Amino acid sequence: MKVYLTEMHSIRDAIRTMYLSKRTWTPELESKIKKAVNYCTDRDGRPLTGFNDNDPIKNEFEDMVNKLFKWGKHHITMLRFLDVSVTVEGLHRGATDDLDAHAKRMDNRIIRSSTRLANYQSSEISDWYKDKIIPTDTALKLLAMDLPEEIEYDGNTYVKAENGYIIKGQENNKDVKRGLYMLSLPMTFTFKINITELAHVYIERGKSQKNGGMAHGTAAPELQDMIEDLIDQVHEWYPQIDREFLLKVENNNV
């Protein structure tokens, strides 16, 4: 399984939120924020490195970002302006379903590989399952046992397919084929979520305390690994966002 943090947008919008309530925002301040963000981040929203410690624009940017995260964990709407874009490759279908349960928190911005539109093989299982299960079709090959291409049952003919048999005439019907797919199938998907909602998803789906993590929810082990990997990458981009920070975002149990 691989997790890719592809973008984080928009720190500029999030910074701006600090200056609206007391009417301190001005077009001049907006230009200042824009200059700092453009100077200190790349086109994907990732903060740049290698600046001199005395660089005034870099120091100004860091000051604004530090203030944003200081106040944002309490004023959670501020952090809703900062999105995390993620692509995941190889998380098993059951765990993907568990993550998809939070689609509302992603504003329904999640697209997964489909068991209806795509084809899968019996031998395809996620990394977490590879040393734990052997699908029946794979086991039969290992034992050099062949099953008939067709069988008769209850007056009908069934044709051999992945993981079982399908009634003849429906063997190419994708809605029928998906009924034989297993939850261990590796899925690819992409989603977008803001920092405020990510805090909640981390709490519910990150590595549990009994497994050495800080989250209090339960999730499939492979999903826990995925979430922890993602948080590590987010933290690499913005060191202010660590597990302790996410625990303090005030909507994390809502």
Image (tube, rainbow, N blue to C red):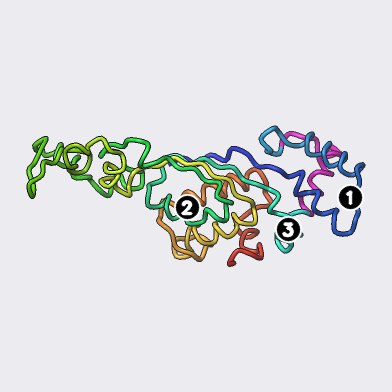
Residue at position x 33%, y 49% from top?
183
How far separated are the C-alphas under marks 2 and 1? Answer: 38 Å
Residue marked by disc 1: 25
How far separated are the C-alphas under marks 3 and 1? Answer: 17 Å
Q: Position of residue 74 (x, y in %)?
A: 72, 64
Q: Is residue 247 visible?
A: yes
Foreground residue, 113 or 233? 113
Horizontal relation, residue 105 to residue 44: left or right: left
Q: Amino acid at mark 3?
A: Gly
Mark 1 packing: few (<14 Cα in 10 Å), some, or many (20+)?
some
The quadrant where residue 43 appears: top right
Residue 109 lies in the magenta-colored region: no
Residue marked by disc 2: 100
Foreground residue, 214 or 78? 78
Image quarter of the C terminus: bottom right
Horizontal relation, residue 156 to residue 42: left or right: left
Q: Amino acid at mark 2?
A: Asp
Mark 3, secondary structure of its residue: helix
Q: Range of the magenta residues?
A: 48-67
Horizontal relation, residue 146 to residue 223: left or right: left
Image quarter of the N terminus: top left
Residue marked by disc 3: 72
Residue 50 lies in the magenta-colored region: yes
How far separated are the C-alphas under marks 2 and 3? Answer: 26 Å
Q: Is residue 144 visible?
A: no
The quadrant where residue 90 appears: top left
Residue at position x 7%, y 43% from top?
152
Foreground residue, 187 or 37? 187
